[in-house]
Amino acid sequence: MSPLKRKKLSKIRLELDKLDNSLIKIIKKRTNLVKKVLALKDKKNQIIDQKRIKTILKNIRKKSLKNNIDPKITNRIWKNMIWSYIQFEKRNFKKK
């Protein structure tokens, strides 16, 4: 790789790092909201809402296409995020 390309690559990676830092802050906010939702659930079987999951993924697909983003990427990201939060809720569920 040429020195010019290395410099460009380094600059792009710095931008990616900044973006990752922003994503971490967003994930923290999302986690706090999920905790609030979890506090409202009475039973562990309320954690998984297939209808809501389907709606979310459908909306993400639409938004991805509208924004010219490969929907396979966003679908995979959201599925992983949804299932990660489901596991989080299961680990943190407290019977009332």
Image (cartoon, rainbow, N blue to C red):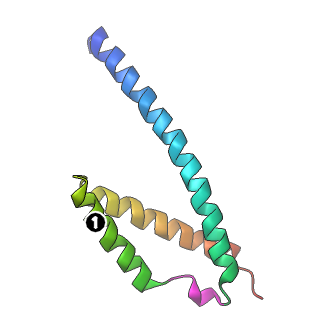
Q: Position of residue 55 (x, y in %)?
A: 36, 78
Quadrant occupied by the C terminus: bottom right
Q: Position of residue 15 (x, y in %)?
A: 43, 30
| Image-quadrant location for residue 11 | top left
| Image-quadrant location for residue 88 | bottom right
Query: What residue is rendered at 40% in x and 67% in y?
Result: 79
CA neighbours of label 1 inside 10 A, class few (<14), some (14 to 19), many (20+): some
How many numbered discs sit on the rendered protein? 1
- Name the outermost residue toward the top: 3
Q: Is residue 47 above or below residue 15?
A: below
- Name the outermost residue toward the right: 96
Would you say 36 lies left or right of 96 here?
left
Q: Name the foreground residue: 19 vs 7.
A: 19
**Residue kind at label 1, given as amino acid type:** Arg
| Residue at the disc numbered 1 | 61
Task: Write the start and end of the magenta stretch as one range.
Answer: 43-48
Query: What residue is rendered at 27% in x and 59% in y?
Result: 64
Asked if residue 88 lies in the magenta stretch, the reply is: no
Query: What residue is rendered at 48% in x and 34% in y?
Result: 17
| Image-quadrant location for residue 92 | bottom right
Q: Is residue 25 above or below residue 30?
A: above
